[in-house]
Image (spheres, helix red, strand yellow):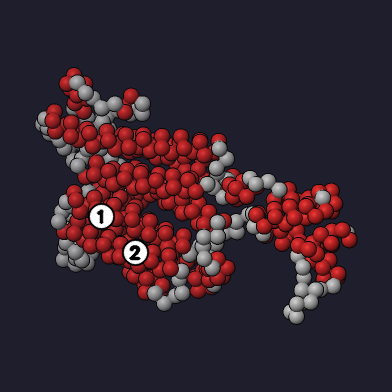
Amino acid sequence: MQLLNGAFMRLLPAKDVNGRILGASLLRYRYQRLPALIGRANFLIASKLADAATTDYGQRGVLKHLPTFTFRRHASTTAAPALGKWAVDAPIVGYWSLFCASMVFGIIVWGGLTRLTESGLSIVEWAPITGAKLPTSDEQWESEFEKYKQFPEYHKVHIGITLDDFKRIYFMEWFHRNIGRLFGLVYLIPTAYFVSKGMVTRAGKAKLTGLGLLLLGQGAMGWYMVSSGLEKELGESPDAVPRVSQYRLTSHLSLAYILYAGLSLYGWNVFRANRMLKNKITNQDALRSLLLKPTIVSYRRKITAATFLVGATCLSGAMVAGLDAGLIYNEFPTMGHGITPPLSELWNEFFARGDPSAMWRNLTENPATVQLEHRAFAMTTFFTLSALWWQGRKLPLPRAARATLHLMYALAWLQVTLGISTLVDFVPIANASAHQANSVLLLASALGLYHTLRPLPRIPV
């Protein structure tokens, strides 16, 4: 012990406020706390201290008395990078996750265009592998056209279209499916690589597995949705319109929104953890304390609820799209002679299909009721976000949270404007597509605000 004290007397001299050397009792106290100090120190400083001690007294004279875990952690030049990889996912995983989220955004927008141009039922077969190839010869195009003619949409919607017209709607659906195929490869191949190289933590592996299963379910739901519009019974009923089920359309779109949200949050979390690990977040302790204040915690909970409200509004919009409910009551804020249509129209026995206990179907199958529901969701969401913006202006929010709050409020105004213009102009394709695209951005801004207000995680080191 005397030898050890002598070694660290030279390395860590302890002095009082007057510059005098402290006694041996305080020096021993310094030695007892040394493992904790080294554990928090920079690797380079710890290495130099160890080298200096070894130079003065030899390896056996010092190292045999030091706690083994201290040097097990700092003796190798590769220890620090390995520790970073162990603590959080690699930064490239975050970039890749956000790229995947951007692809989902593009797929959502293109899928909306496919629906708006009534192209979604042009490919009547589900061929995940062979369907990736676009027809090239006249014979192949004629064959696909003849298949399409066997289904109700050709006889009720696209009556007498030419082969060139068919090629245009076929390409819309083909491209939508192929973006999905490409996304599957972009997701699955890098995931396997990152996991095999140890670039993902155990928690990250679980999240990526869940998102992968969601991706597979999304593909299956896509075909399940399309098949609902290919039923031959739709051609036998004179009043039936060949279109996909609004329930399946909403399910398909909801999975896309969930996938987008999951990928975005995952990517943001990876970036945040890496910045914390590299000490790139200034005033971490102050920020940690701020995010744990009761007022901020309460505000974050309100933002969480508002985010779910935004998502619910998006899904109610999918119901409107599935029923073509935007083609009636093309006025705002009234619906006919009042704010709402007559109750007899909103709660009609026709949609109960002869079953008095099934009047609830008006909520999901009556176009007038579904449009009113979407209006109610939209206005509730807008005023909720407005109130949260007003409250957030007065709170000591972090800079990133404040910027995201203003962005969310601006997107809320834009979303309402696009929604009203889409309705009163009888659903033009450009307006309707922009309305759907902005709904994703609005959801992303709400998620981003929630993310910036989350407590800082404890990174294991």
Residue 370 visible? The answer is no
Residue 429 visible? The answer is yes
Q: Residue at x 46, y 60 (%)?
A: 451
Residue 206: image quadrant is top right
Q: Is residue 177 left or right of residue 58?
A: left
Q: Position of residue 363 (x, y in %)?
A: 31, 54
Residue 103: image quadrant is top left
Pick the quarter of the image with the N terminus. bottom right
Pick the quarter of the image with the C terminus. bottom right
Residue extending farthest to the front is 56
* Numbered tag placed on residue 407 in the rendering: 2
Q: Given the image, on which type of amino acid does mark 1 rest?
A: His
The crowd level at tag 1 (other Cα within 10 Å; few <14, some 14-19, many 20+) is many
* Numbered tag placed on residue 435 in the rendering: 1
Helix, strand or loop for disc 1: helix
Q: Position of residue 306 (x, y in %)?
A: 40, 63
Q: Residue at x 25, y 27 (%)?
A: 134
Q: Position of residue 270 (x, y in %)?
A: 50, 52
The crowd level at tag 2 (other Cα within 10 Å; few <14, some 14-19, many 20+) is some
Residue 123: image quadrant is top left
Q: Given the image, on which type of amino acid does mark 2 rest?
A: Leu
Residue extending farthest to the bottom is 18
Q: Is residue 248 left or right of residue 153?
A: right
Q: Who comes first in sequence, dot 1 or dot 2?
A: 2
